[in-house]
Each structure stands twice: as C-alpha cells, then as structure tokens.
Image: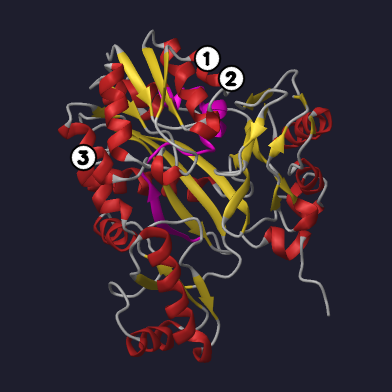
Amino acid sequence: MFRKILVANRGEIALRVIRACRDLGIEVAVVYSEADRGAPYLELADQAICIGPPIATESYLKVTRIIAAAEVAGAQAIHPGYGFLSENSKFAEQCRESGIEFIGPPVEAMDKLGNKDKAKAVAKAAKVPTVPGSDGLITSDAEAMKFAKAVGYPVLIKAAAGGGGRGMRVVREESGLSAAISSAKSEAEGAFKDGSVFMEKYLDRPRHVEVQLLGDKHGNVVHLYERDCSLQRRHQKLVEESPSPNLPAKVREKMCEAAVRLAKQAGYYSAGTCEFLVDQENNFYFIEVNARIQVEHPVTELVTGVDLIREQIRIAAGEKLKLTQKDIVQRGHAIEVRINAEDPAHDFRPSAGTITTWRPPGGPGVRLDSHVVAGYKVPPNYDSMVAKLLVHQPTRAEAFAVMRRALREFKVEGIKTTIPIHQTIFDTPEFIEGKIDTTFIERVLMPPKKS
C-alpha cells in the first residue's frame, strides 16, 4: 500500500479523497490554487501545496506543477478526483514516467475510451449495442447529409473528444445541418483542442442510465449496478438515483453485463462508468465511458455499501478485488441532488460570493458531501457545486420523503443555490411517478415562454 498520496483536485472531491486516505492509514498531501488558499479542508491534509493562480490552466490543469508537487511531497501516487486532469491520458503517462502511480485506469484504456469514436469501436467489438452512428469522423457536409438521409432526422452531432454537452448539436432538418457541423467543430476545438465530430441518430426523450464498474490489474471486473442520471439541464446532471425507476430487471441485468464486457474488452481497471441511453421501449445504447470516479459515486456507495474511493486506491496499489459479483447487492433506494451556487430564477446564473449562513441537514438516512462551512467564499473560477445532498431509504417513496425534509432543513445564505428548484422537482407528479427523461427539466419544469 502507498505511504503517501497527493490529491490533484479541489473542493468536495479533494476532501472525499483525503478522508479515504485517512481511513486507509495513508498520509495525504493536497494541492491548491490562490483562489482556494485558506479553504478549511486543506487543514485536514498532512501537507498543502500551492500550485499557482486561480486560473485552472495555470494551477489545477498545470501538469508540471502537479508532478513537482508530488515529488516535493514525496507521494507515491496521485489521485486526480474528477474533472481537471482525471481523464487526461498524457497526464497519467507523465505520472508513471515520473515513477508516480496514477490512481485511475491504464493509459491504453484511457486512449481507447477517451475518444467517443474509438470507444464506440470498442463497444461494437464487445457486442454492446450502440446508437446508429457515422462510420468514423465526419469529414465533409456531403458525407453528413448522406448519413442523415440514411438514418432519418433528427440527428446528433457530437464532439469526438470531451463531454458536458460542448460540441453537441441536434439537427432536425437538412437546411440546418451544415451550420450545425461548423458550430459544433468550432466549439469542440475551443473546448478540447480537437474539432473532430461524428454523428448519431438522435433518440427522442431517452433516459440516461450509467453503470458503475470496478476492475483490478488482474483482469477482474465487476459492476455495482446502475444510476439514473436523466434529470439534466443543458447536459449537466441535477439529480441521480439508484435503482433506476421503472427499469425492467432483465434490462438492468443485460445492461450491467454489457458494461462489464466492454471494460474487459478495453483492458480497463480502476473505477469507471459506462453510460447508456435507454429509449422509450427500454432498448439501451452505449454512448461513452467516464474513465474516472464520478461526481455521483456516493449514490452507488449507499446502495451497495462499497467505498469506491478506497477501492480505487487499493486497485492502484496492485491489490486484487476482494468483491465478486455475487457479493454486490442493491439495497434500498438512494438519491443525490447537486447543490450549486446558481440562481435558478435567473437562468441558473452563477452566484459566487461569501456564504454567511450554512445550516446543513442531518438525521437518519441523510449524507452530505461538501467542503463548505459558514464564511466560505465561493470562487468564480471553478465549477459551481458546493454540496452533494444524498438520502438512502428502503424504498423510493421513503427516499423522497427524507429528501423533502432534508431540502427544507438546508439553509444557505449569502449566495443563491439550486435548493429551490430541487424542492420543486421532488413535488412534481411526473418525477414522483418515475416518468423521466433527459428533456424533463426543459419540457416539464422550464418550458419555453410563449411569445
């Protein structure tokens, strides 16, 4: 096992990894930018190292500074958390070239799965269903028009690299195809330094369901069942739950088995998530792999009792998985809501500033993952999430009741948060009945205003 680990991230996930290291008896160092200087969670590490100014490209995304910090700290491994450099195979490679273990998947698997077009080829080889798509990257408008005519509109243009909805366009008729391709390529180039795109048949009102995976360096891979992440706004998740509501047991079983096949095909180890779209007839289609720990990993931890961060660390240290598939059981129902520093009443406008009151909820069945305390200043430089509020109960109905209570207890002043829209979501009949899809927020809660 490692003697010391460097956490190459910030905020909630940095604190989560610090705690896992403590539980395993491992010393821990953490990096921080000038924007995070004085953040309370830094005091919980054995060592905190400043790596640069607030701008992420000069701090949390600066590979040379993070490697240097690990060397100064004497760390044997780096945990990248999620976001920032967590899915950057070049960073992983530089870690290992420097004699530092990257707590994540192998570089080869990251390269196969980090590009959506390559990942689809891996899925096909593993006999995992994929959304009908272009045969490789789109290189001309004529090629795109030919594909669109073959599968029928609407079609979806997607950036081959990256995610989060950037470089993605829905095209419903041929007249808008050329402009959409140009726009998607431009956005992808700006966001990922890679303007390549491919096309897929657009599935109308699908659910977004993902399967949590764990694999070790000895070829063992298990799934930890699924999470439903359909409640999104502009491709950003707001609510996640497990089990997925109204998903037939046979579909769940086949989807989880497909995810394991894909991971084995790619030679994958560590924690990872295989993401699927599920259409209205419960057919599922692979879309991508997130080759890292996910924001919503605590949902799976609650229903399975498995600490995913600890398992990541053990796997990176070369240990075999102690869990077999038969050991992993879904128990009860877990739900997570992301509490963001945003104003839902004004188009989710970011709300940076000082938190003057922070009264978190508690009681049976409630878990709060957050690095925030009263007096904490939310910086404008990074993701706006300030907390993840989770509940776990024997049934979905009971989980809803506890979530309503927890949201009512949660008091935050000094900034705006997404708590009000979550309260609305959990009182919406369609959501209560599990009638959800990726268009739910815009279609049900925030429909376009009539002119």
Report the residue that reaches farthest toward the top.
Answer: 25
Residue at 36% over, 27% down: 312
Kindly identify which residue carries mark 3. Answer: 93
State if disc 1 and disc 2 touch (CB < 8 Å).
yes
What residue type is disc 1 on?
Glu
Out of 186 and 429, give the one closest to the viewer. 186
* Label 3 secondary element: helix
Q: What is the spatial separation of the Cα atoms under label 2 and label 1, in whole angstroms?
A: 6 Å
Q: What is the spatial separation of the Cα atoms under label 3 and label 1, in whole angstroms?
A: 30 Å
Q: Is residue 1 left or right of residue 288?
A: left
Residue 303 among those drawn in magenta = yes
Q: Which mark is residue 43?
A: 1
Highlighted magenta segment, given as a residue range: 283-309
Give x and y (percent) for residue 436: 67, 55
| Quadrant occupied by the C terminus | bottom right
Out of 10 and 438, give the one closest to the viewer. 10
Kindly identify which residue carries mark 2. Answer: 40
Residue at 55% over, 82% down: 172
Please tell me in which quadrant of the rendered image residue 38 appears: top right
Residue 327 among those drawn in magenta = no
Q: Nearer the viewer, mark 3 or mark 1?
A: 1
* Label 2 secondary element: helix
Give x and y (percent) for residue 237: 59, 49
Q: Is residue 297 above or below residue 155?
A: above
Residue at 61% over, 40% down: 385
Q: Is residue 389 visible?
A: no
What residue type is disc 2 on?
Pro
Q: What is the spatial separation of the Cα atoms under label 3 and label 2, in whole angstroms?
A: 32 Å
